[in-house]
Amino acid sequence: FYSLSSFTMPSTIYRYDLKERKQSVFFQPQLAFNAGDYETKQVFYTSKDGTKIPMFIVHKKGLVLDGNNPVLLFGYGGFNVSKSPEFKIERLVFLEKGGIFAQPCIRGGGEYGEAWHEAGTKLKKQNVFDDFIAAGEYLVKEKYTAPRKIGIGGRSNGGLLVGACMLQRPDLFGVALPTVGVLDMLRYHKFTIGWAWKGDYGSSEDSTQFHYLLNYSPLHNIREGVDYPATLVTTGDHDDRVVPAHSFKFTATLQEKYKGDQPVMIRVDVNSGHASTTALGSSKPVAKQIEEQSDIFTFLMKNLGMSW
């Protein structure tokens, strides 16, 4: 038995008969969704320093490249984690309504081995943000979308990615969705398991690394007089991996300094941890997961001007 999934196909279990050398579907979830209506492609674009970065793009077939399509750009870029195609049912409404999902395999991940990972750590962490920003620029250049029609999302280390990029290029992104993000880079190592991340981030206790971290730490780079994207910060009140203080402080500072018209909100899931778990470590009930994703995608689609 083996399983296979993609951006548009839920995890399907196959049975392979070694004697007959034939495969058959053993189990496939039944969804009111026609995967044949969509296409997935992989493109390569150039980052700020000339590095070629791969990116997956998913959208309806026949999409018109008129520079006006809404995009969800999702990334991670850290801890040697490779971002491969993965089915997420919550994206279906976004895709059905004409949205584009894009997932760049940026440095800091493990897609091309340890060198790719190392190129996005410590004093090279800015490469990760540059790669992600360049993905947005590519989508604009190739007429997939336009500035401010791009929503950016990421979880945990990906929340750091979103926080840094929305502050560095507020003109490019229209919606920011940092979920359970690491947002205080000067004190992250003082909370629970944060000390274990020094291998990727470095530490503010080192003078050289302190100044580097200060230059991109989302909490410390919010400025007054800047038109930031519509922002929905998401956290769990019992997150003991990336403590909710990161999200609380970032949201409070952004609400204090931002004077524009875009909404800045925080969603705190009660009795929930870092991932899809409750405070007690058990799986988060499906009803709570549906509520969370409904809020996130409603915020995204409303602020990108989509109808549903």
Image (tube, rainbow, N blue to C red):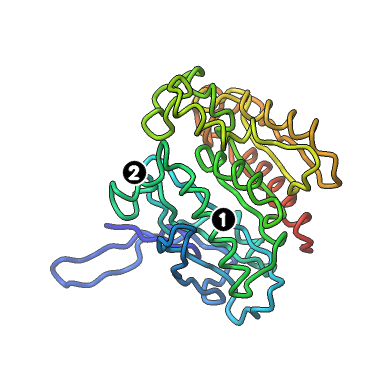
Residue closest to the eye, 308 or 118: 118
Q: Which type of secondary structure does the marked residue at label 2 adopt?
A: helix
Quarter of the image containing the N terminus? bottom left
Q: How many marks?
A: 2
Q: Which mark is residue 173?
A: none
Q: CA distance from mark 2 to mark 1?
A: 19 Å
Q: Give residue 83's position: percent from left, percent from top.
A: 42, 53
Classify residue 135 by image quadrant.
bottom right
User: Eyeballing the image, is 91 above or below 155?
Assistant: below
Residue 289 image offset from top left, x and y in percent: 61, 41
Residue that appears at 62% across and 58% down = 72
Which type of secondary structure does the marked residue at label 1 adopt?
helix
107 or 196, which is in the foreground? 107
- With respect to residue 260, does 13 lie above or below? below
Q: Earlier in the sequence, mark 2 or mark 1?
A: 2
Q: What residue is drawn where x is 65% and y is 80%?
A: 64
- Report which residue position mark 1 lands on: 133
Across and down, in percent, residue 238 comes to 58, 23
Relative placement, left or right, of 228 versus 99 is right
Q: Nearer the viewer, residue 49 or 254?
A: 49
Q: Taking 302 as reference, is 60 above or below it?
A: below
The residue where tag 2 is placed is 118
Of 172 and 266, nearer the camera is 172
- Look at label 2 and name its amino acid: Glu
Q: x, y percentage for residue 176?
A: 67, 47
Relative to 214, residue 95 above or below? below
Tell me the residue at 62%/72% (across/down).
144
Q: Quadrant of the C terminus?
A: bottom right
